Image: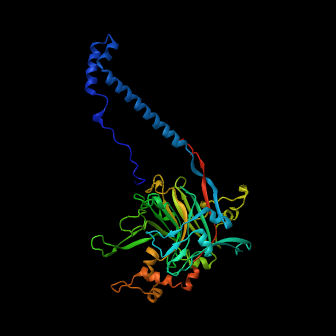
Amino acid sequence: MSPRNNQSYSSIDESSSLLDESHHHHASKKMEIKSDSSVSDYHDVSPWKLRVWNISILAISAALVLFVVNILLSSSALKPIGPYLLVEAQEGRNFFSFYDFYDGPDSLGSAGYNMYVSEARAVDLDIAKVITEMDPLSGDQVDFVHMSSAPTETGPRDSIRLEGRRRFDHGLFILDVRHQPTGCGVWPAFWLTDEASWPRNGEVDILEGVNGQTVAKTALHTSDKCDMYAHVSPKAMTGEWEWVTGIPNQFTGKPDFKTSKPADNCWVMAQHQWANEGCTAVHDRNDTLGAPVNDNGGGVYALEWDPENNKAIKSWVFPIQDMPQNLIDAIDSAGLKDSSKRVMPKPHSWGDPYAFFAIGDGTGCSADHFKNMRIVFNLAYCGNVSGNRFTSECPGIAHKFNVTDKKGVNDPVQTCNAYIKSNPELLVEAYWKIRGVYVYERELKRPKKDTS
C-alpha cells in the first residue's frame, strides 16, 4: 500500500441514517395531540429503536471527543523544529561500529560486477581499515577511514557495502571525504534508503558518481505523488534540474528527442523520465565530484532533510579549502566529549544550496514519502548504470575491451566487466578516504500556538 493511500474514512450514507424521518414526523403529531402527558410520548417509540438511538448518540459523542483530543494532541505534540543536536560522530577507530557489513552479491536493481564481503573478510583483504595520517588542513595526526576493493580470479571484485545501524525520519548529514572512488567502470555512492520498503519509504542519493563524472547531483526516488513542479522556485537553489530527452516512445520504441523536460518528478515510474530516475538536481559547477575534488584535497557533502521546520531537502558541496566557518567549527568540535563545547551547525548560514526539494505540508510531496531510512556506503562496478553507460562515457577503453553480442553489436555492460576483470592500474583511484560522518537532528519542541 502506498504511503499516500491513507483515505481510510468513508462517506456517510444518508439513506442509512438512524433517524427515521417518517417515524419522527408521526411521533411529533402524536406529541401534539397528547401534550398533557410527556411520558406517554415515549410509548410510541419501540424499545429497540430507542436503544439504537441511544447507542448512536453515544457513538457520535465518542467520535467527536476523539476528534477533539486528536487535534489537541497533534497541536501540542513535540516536533523536530528546534536547533540541531549531534546524534552521531562517526570518526576514526569507532567509524565501523556504526555500520553492518553487507555480505553477498549486489542487488538486482544495481547488478554491479562485484561481491560485497563481511567485515572479517574485508579486514583480511586489507580493504577496510583506519590509518593515522597527518591532516593537511590542521597539521595534526588524524585517523582516516579507508575503503576499497580487491580483484578476484573469477572477475567480479570483492568490495564493501556498509549499512547504517540507526534509522532516521529527518536529520542533517555531513560527510567529510578526502578522497572518493573515481574512474571508468567505478560506481560509488553515499545515500539514504529503506530497501525493505523501497520506493515507498524513499531514497536520497547524496553522493553518487559513475565513470569518472565530475558534477555532483542529488536525486530523490519515491512512490507516486511526489512532484517538485511549481513547488520549487529557481531562486531556491544554485543548481538546476537534470533535463531528460530521448525517452523511447511507448508505442514505437524509438527515442523521442522532440520532448525535453526537467527531471522534477520523484516518482520512480514518472512519465517522460527514465525508469527510476527520480527528481534530480545538478550542481552548477563541474568540479564538485570525483577527480577534481580529490585533486583539491577533498570536500564536504551536506544534506539537510527537514520536513517540519524548512519543509525541504537541501544539498551543499564545499571544497575542503573553502568551507563556511560554522561548518568547520561543527566538524572540528563534533568529537569532543564535553557537549557544551561542541558547535552546532547552522545551515542557513552556509549560503544557498545547489539542490532544493520541497517536501512536507503545503508542497507537492508529503513528508511520509521519506522515513525509516539509514545511511549506506557502497562501492560498485559496472552494473545497470556505470555498465550501460560505459561505452559512451569511456569510449577509448571500451574500444580496447570491446565485447559484442550475437549480432556483433557492442555490449556496454560486458565490455565494462571485461575491463574491470583485467584489474587495470587505473583502479588505484577507486577508494574512499573519510575523515568522518556527522549526523544531527533537530531538538524536539512544541510548536508555538497560532494567536492570529
- Drawn side of residue 324 relative to residue 303, left or right: right
Q: Is any atom of residue 262 visible in this view? A: yes
The answer to which quarter of the image holds residue 303 is bottom right
Count of numbered circles in the view? 0
Q: Is any atom of residue 452 visible in this view? A: no
- Rendered location of residue 241, percent (x, y): 45, 68
Q: For the point 38% across and 25% down, which residue is it?
A: 54
Q: Nearer the viewer, residue 95 or 14?
A: 95
The answer to which quarter of the image holds residue 405 is bottom left
The type of colouring in the image is: rainbow
Q: Nearer the viewer, residue 154 or 95?
A: 154
- Drawn side of residue 270 relative to residue 238, left or right: left
Q: For the point 41% across and 53% down, which residue is it?
A: 4
Q: Nearer the viewer, residue 409 or 299?
A: 409
- Rendered location of residue 412, percent (x, y): 42, 81
Please say if 401 is above or below 150: below
Q: Nearer the viewer, residue 182 or 257?
A: 182
Please say if 306 is above or below 141: above
The answer to which quarter of the image holds residue 221 is bottom left
- Rendered location of residue 250, percent (x, y): 30, 70
- Rendered location of residue 74, percent (x, y): 51, 43
Q: For the point 60% across and 77% down, which residue is it?
A: 294
Residue extending farthest to the top is 36
